[in-house]
Amino acid sequence: MKLNALIIAIVFLAAASTSAKDWRGIVPLHSTRADVERLLGPPETDRGFIIFYTIDFSRVSFHLPQSTCGQPGSLWNVAPNIVTEIWVTHQQLHEVRLSDVDVSKGFRTEKDPELGDILNYINDAEGIRYEVDTPSGIIGLTQYFPPAKENYRRCPVKP
């Protein structure tokens, strides 16, 4: 009986922890710079708070804030060098189309206020955004960010 309860608890915990979108195992607010470098090696470009790689015809950036809450540039209550966002810019040689992904559930759309042909498909619950060129249906950018369930980790907004 206790074994059945333990198995059920493990299944629920596993389901709860998998709602965040990851990129190749890197999860915003949970993975570190060391995790990224262990997976991908040293970055091609290192700006301290953001590191860049070129992988499979895509430019990938990992955002790693260096300041804590209350300091300029801090949005999340995490230690320095924790991945807060991942941006994957897709190159023309490796086009990804909107039809290649499922945006039928949980996504809202936002038109880019400056670029009229760009439409963003955003799923706040999972922490993913696709930036789509509407005439072609090509995804130019995929952004991974903390899911809504992690909002309690945001830094307080000062008036």
Image (cartoon, helix red, strand yellow):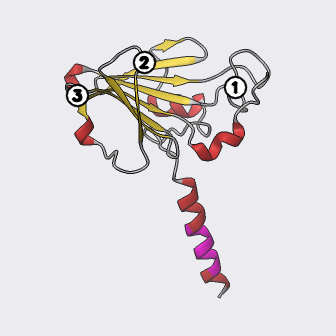
Which SS type dominates the magenta stretch?
Answer: helix
- Sequence-first disc among 1 and 2: 1
Rendered residue at 52%/31% (across/down): 36
Rendered residue at 65%/88% (across/down): 1
Rendered residue at 65%/26% (across/down): 81
Q: Quadrant of residue 8?
A: bottom right
Distance (Cα) linking label 1 and label 3 = 34 Å
Q: Note whether 146 is above or below 6 in the view shown.
A: above
Q: Note whether 1 is above or below 20 in the view shown.
A: below
Look at mark 1 in the image and give the residue it sits on: 80
User: In the drawing, what numbered circle is on residue 96?
Assistant: none
Look at mark 3 in the image and give the residue it sits on: 95
Q: Nearer the viewer, residue 28 or 128?
A: 128
Look at mark 2 in the image and give the residue it sits on: 113
Q: Which residues are magenta?
A: 5-11
Q: Residues within 10 Å of mark 3 (few under 14, many from 20)?
A: some
State which mark lies toward you, 3 or 2.
2
The type of residue carrying mark 2 is Pro
Residue 9 highlighted magenta (yes or no) = yes
